[in-house]
Image: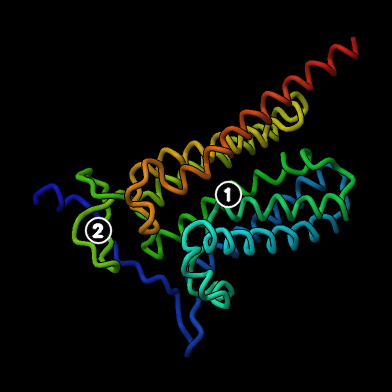
């Protein structure tokens, strides 16, 4: 009992303010921030790379649609398919919550494919290497939104930084896994930004994409071990759905990095 006194009682209001039936929520604010700051980052990158300013405007639209649609469909399909298959219209009820990061990642890849075909003259991998920088920051903001919603938290802990999520009816401290993941993604964002600014001329195309996938989804895989199940069907699984979906992304990350360095090595041989 004495140890619990050191831990944090968390009862954050997910709403910033409300006017009648209209509520502005922290989660929505963090989503908006992720797009705004992401747009600023991409705009500066494209300017640095001498690409038209209109390309940044268009990629924002593609990414916004792809990430939101993908994240929503990912949640409905991966985590609660039985319910939504019987209530298809509720797939559209995004305001009720329910977004999956793996679905968002798939949505972004599909959106970027169409963007690359219709707008950009750059390769798909070249675009990915730059886009992963703001995406890592967006992942941090989204986890902070989860924290303000008191959702996606961990199992019980006796550590002094455990959170008691009072609004969810919890009386025991739980791992604040939103913070764990958020900090990992923030570190990833800083690292990717530094690599782009200082090393991009020496790094092979595809390396940043591979590093992003390997780091992000390894962090996600590990944190999932101390998360509470997101859906009832996960309770008796050896690996939960988040971990199962992370494994292909981790493998793809390694594959991207290996391919990038092999391609760079071949190009150097040809030039000598």
Q: Is residue 254 visible to the viewer in this orientation of the structure?
A: yes
Question: For the residues marked 1 and 2, what is the alpha-carbon distance in whole angstroms?
Answer: 26 Å
Count of marks placed on residues = 2
Image quadrant occupied by the C terminus: top right
Which numbered disc flags the more N-terminal residue, 1 or 2?
1
**Does 256 sit above or below residue 167?**
above
Expressed as whole percent of the image width and height from the top left, the position of residue 169 reads 24, 67
Residue 218: horizontal and vertical position, in percent? 49, 36
Pick the residue in front: 32 or 271: 271
* Label 2 environment density (alpha carbons within 10 Å; few <14, some 14–19, many ≥20): many
**Badge 1 density bin: few <14, some 14–19, many ≥20, Cα 10 Å:** many
Percent position of residue 166, x then y: 25, 65
Residue sitting at the far top: 272
- Which one is nearer the viewer's eye here, 261 or 100? 100
Please state which of residues 238 and 180 is positioned toward the viewer in this rendering.
238
In the drawing, does residue 214 fall left or right of residue 175? right
Which residue bears the numbered disc 1? Answer: 137
Which residue lies at the image location 60% right of the left edge and 65% below the top edge? Answer: 32
SS of the residue under disc 2? strand
Direction left: furthest residue: 1
The quadrant holding residue 212 is top right
Q: Position of residue 266 (x, y in %)?
A: 82, 16
Task: Please determine whether, in this image, residue 257 is positioned above or below residue 17.
Answer: above
Name the residue at the bottom extreme.
20
Q: How is the image coloured?
A: rainbow
Mark linked to residue 164: 2
Which residue is at 87% across, 48% downward? 51
């Amino acid at each position: 009992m004495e140890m619990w006194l050191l831990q944090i009682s968390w009862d954050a209001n997910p709403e910033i303010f409300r006017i009648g039936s209209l509520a502005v929520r922290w989660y929505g604010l963090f989503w908006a921030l992720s797009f705004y700051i992401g747009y600023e980052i991409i705009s500066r990158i494209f300017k640095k790379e001498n690409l038209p300013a209109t390309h940044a405007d268009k990629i924002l639209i593609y990414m916004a649609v792809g990430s939101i649609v993908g994240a929503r469909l990912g949640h409905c399909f991966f985590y609660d398919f039985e319910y939504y298959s019987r209530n298809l219209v509720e797939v559209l009820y995004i305001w009720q919550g329910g977004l999956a990061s793996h679905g968002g990642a798939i949505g972004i890849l599909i959106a970027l494919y169409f963007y690359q075909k219709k707008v950009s003259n750059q390769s798909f991998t070249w675009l990915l290497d730059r886009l992963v920088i703001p995406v890592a920051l967006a992942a941090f903001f989204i986890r902070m939104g989860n924290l303000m919603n008191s959702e996606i938290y961990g199992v019980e802990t006796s550590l002094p930084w455990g959170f008691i999520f009072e609004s969810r009816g919890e009386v025991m401290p739980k791992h604040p896994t939103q913070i764990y993941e958020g900090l990992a993604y923030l570190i990833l964002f800083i690292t990717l930004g530094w690599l782009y600014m200082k090393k991009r001329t020496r790094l092979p195309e595809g390396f940043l994409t591979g590093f992003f996938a390997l780091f992000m989804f390894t962090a996600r895989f590990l944190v999932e071990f101390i998360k509470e199940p997101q859906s009832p069907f996960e309770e008796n699984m050896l690996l939960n759905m988040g971990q199962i979906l992370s494994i292909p992304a981790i493998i793809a990350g390694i594959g991207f990095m290996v391919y990038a360095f092999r391609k760079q090595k071949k190009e150097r041989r040809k030039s000598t």
